[in-house]
Amino acid sequence: MSTSEARVLLVDDLRSFVDGRDAEVARTSAAGVRLLEHYRDRSLDELWLDHDLGEEDTIWPVVEVLERAAFAGRPFDVGLINIHSANPAGAARMARALRRWGYRVAIAAESAEVGYLDGPT
């Protein structure tokens, strides 16, 4: 990866970046945890998080990894965490938890950057 390429991770069960930008995508919380751990000692430009990941799955296992790392004094190096969930209560709770640990967070619930490429299923 060249230094000019952004490192972007997206954790969302259905949506993708509508502009086709280069990003690594996880569709479940377990895959999100694995992807985040893969980048443990590297900087990320953006981390995009959805709250509800289908069935009974939510983003909380990923949030907990971020929290534990910060608690241990080794927070993940993330430029900006974008919360793009359509669940306002879940998004607010995620933002509070992550900001508490010093992460830079934006709530992007109405972001046109992520969407259903083939329409919602």
Image (tube, rainbow, N blue to C red):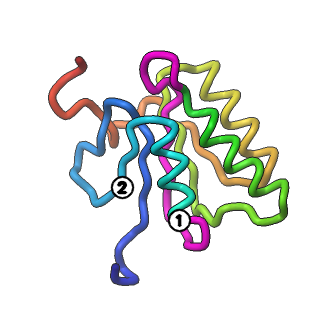
In this image, 72 relative to 21: left or right?
right
* Magenta stretch, residue numbers: 39-57
Label 1 element class: loop
The residue drawn where x is 58% and y is 63% is 79
- Amino acid on which the number 1 mark rests in the picture: Tyr
Residue 72's spot in the image, x, y percent? 84, 59
Disc 2 residue type? Glu
> For this view, does 44 lie left or right of residue 9?
right
Residue at image position (19%, 34%) is 117
Which label number is shown at residue 39? 1
Query: Which of disc 2 and disc 1 is earlier in sequence?
Result: 2
Find the distance from the CA under tag 1 to the CA under tag 2. 11 Å
Residue matched to label 2:
24
Q: Is residue 24 magenta?
A: no
Answer with left or right where residue 104 lies relative to residue 33. Answer: right
Q: What label sits on residue 90 in the rendered view?
A: none
**Magenta span contains residue 41:** yes
